[in-house]
Image (cartoon, rainbow, N blue to C red):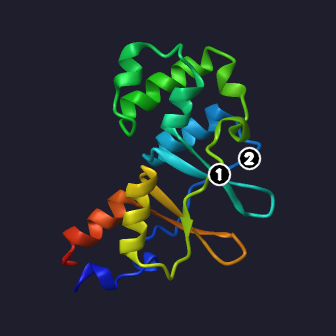
Amino acid sequence: MDIRHFRVRDAMTRELVYVDVSDTVLEALERMRANRVSGLPVVDAQGHCVGVISTSDILDLTEELEEGIAAASRIDAPFHQLALEHLADSDLGTRLVSEVMTHDVVQLTPDASLAQAARLMLAKHVHRVIVVDKSRSLQGIVSTTDILRMIANGAEM
């Protein structure tokens, strides 16, 4: 099947891992590590996606990370472990997710085309698009890995 006919809903991850605006950076990083992801949606009390926090945001938070850690792969478990240790030993980990997150959420509805999601990722230089309904409630997330999985599983370009 031609990938141009697929919708975001066909590829998105529905079992969401996310953080609350009042969670700490350390809690967010621990959740990323435990779930082997490099970024998480940030939701408010109403369940609306108000931002995204990623390992890039955490790296930007501090210039105190050793050069070797900063050069580490951002989705690598060793990066997460080293960053967790560093944040635990400083007060940076106690900062709120809301202070560090990216506020400009790249989002689409489940009915958007998968090609549109890929174009948006390329244009915005991001690895994930947040999937929301018309009321901005979090529905899922589609990542570059999800799109690659669709291609690898037989969808044609």
In the rendered structure, the answer to whether residue 66 lies left or right of residue 19 reads: left
User: Which of these two is toward me, 157 or 54?
Assistant: 157
Q: Name the disc covering residue 51, or none.
A: 1
Choose top left, top right, bottom left or bottom right for residue 156.
bottom left
Dot 2: element: loop
Quadrant containing the N terminus is bottom left
Image point (28%, 66%), residue name: 149
Dot 1: element: strand
Quadrant containing the C terminus is bottom left
Residue 11 visible here: no
In the rendered structure, the answer to whether residue 135 lies left or right of residue 146 reads: right
Q: Position of residue 25 (x, y in %)?
A: 64, 34
Choose top left, top right, bottom left or bottom right for residue 49.
bottom right
In the rendered structure, the answer to whether residue 23 lies left or right of residue 120 reads: right
Q: Position of residue 106 (x, y in %)?
A: 55, 59
Image point (65%, 26%), residue name: 93
